[in-house]
């Protein structure tokens, strides 16, 4: 069984974070990098493998500016971890292996490893989507430009829902 995935998240920071978790399930993490590691707090992603390793991470090099909206996506195919910001590929790291087994419930906007109350995200998170396949860069650009409702067939009618307005907001501003 191949454990590949893709995730897309739209977010806006409300203050200067030291480290803010955007997504955490103790297997996969998407966050802003701690100021102690990089003062611009770029977006980064990493996976926790069965050998206990979380390094190397894939860093975007894109500063998580306060008050600015970002479309961040990450993919992992059991060999390579990739991160995209605003539809553009920004970084990757080799991460071959199997994910650690974990009972941790997925958390959006909080949680560090198994401490589910740590590093809360101070801002707005919208349009969260998880995929059981690795998205290609073209798919990620389409999602960013058109939003979920115009990009893919879904089991739920997404039209008129708050979480499907990213493409419309982006087109206006």
Image (cartoon, rainbow, N blue to C red):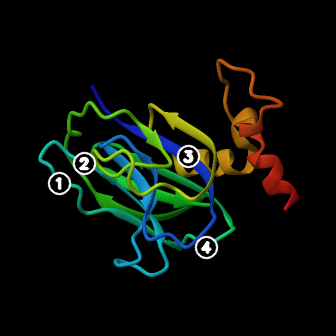
Residue 97 vs 41, above or below: the answer is above
Query: Which mark is nearer the camera, 3 or 4?
Result: 4
Q: CA distance from mark 3 to mark 2?
A: 19 Å
Mark 3 nearby-residue class (10 Å; few <14, some 14–19, many ≥20): many
Verify CB contact (< 8 Å) between mark 3 and mark 4.
no
At 55% from the left and 73% from the top, the residue drawn is 16
Residue 94 place in picture, x, y as percent: 27, 58
Tell me the element at label 1: loop
Q: Is residue 56 left or right of residue 167?
A: left
Tell me the element at label 3: strand
Verify CB contact (< 8 Å) between mark 2 and mark 1.
yes
Q: Earlier in the sequence, mark 3 or mark 4?
A: 3
Residue 43 place in picture, x, y as percent: 48, 64
Q: CA distance from mark 3 to mark 4?
A: 18 Å
At 84% from the left and 62% from the top, the residue drawn is 173
Q: In the picture, residue 50 is in which quadrant?
A: top left
Q: Which mark is residue 48?
A: 2
Q: CA distance from mark 2 to mark 1?
A: 6 Å
Residue 36 vs 94, above or below: the answer is below
Q: Earlier in the sequence, mark 3 or mark 2?
A: 3
Q: Quadrant of the N terminus?
A: top left
Q: Which residue is mark 3?
A: 8
Q: Earlier in the sequence, mark 4 or mark 1?
A: 1
Tell me the element at label 2: loop
């Amino acid at each position: 069984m191949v454990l590949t995935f893709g995730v897309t998240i739209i977010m806006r920071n409300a203050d200067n974070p030291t480290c803010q978790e955007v997504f955490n399930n103790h297997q996969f993490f998407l966050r802003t990098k701690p100021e102690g590691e990089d003062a611009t707090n770029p977006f980064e992603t990493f996976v926790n493998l069965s050998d206990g390793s979380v390094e190397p991470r894939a860093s975007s090099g894109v500063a998580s500016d306060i008050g600015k909206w970002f479309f961040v996506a990450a993919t992992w195919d059991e060999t390579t971890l990739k991160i995209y910001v605003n539809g553009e590929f920004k970084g990757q790291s080799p991460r071959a292996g199997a994910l650690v087994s974990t009972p941790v419930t997925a958390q959006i906007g909080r949680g560090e490893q198994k401490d589910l109350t740590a590093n809360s995200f101070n801002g707005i998170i919208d349009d969260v989507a998880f995929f059981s396949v690795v998205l290609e860069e073209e798919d990620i650009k389409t999602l960013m430009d058109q939003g979920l409702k115009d990009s893919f067939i879904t089991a739920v009618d997404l039209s008129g829902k708050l979480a499907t307005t990213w493409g419309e907001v982006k087109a206006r501003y």
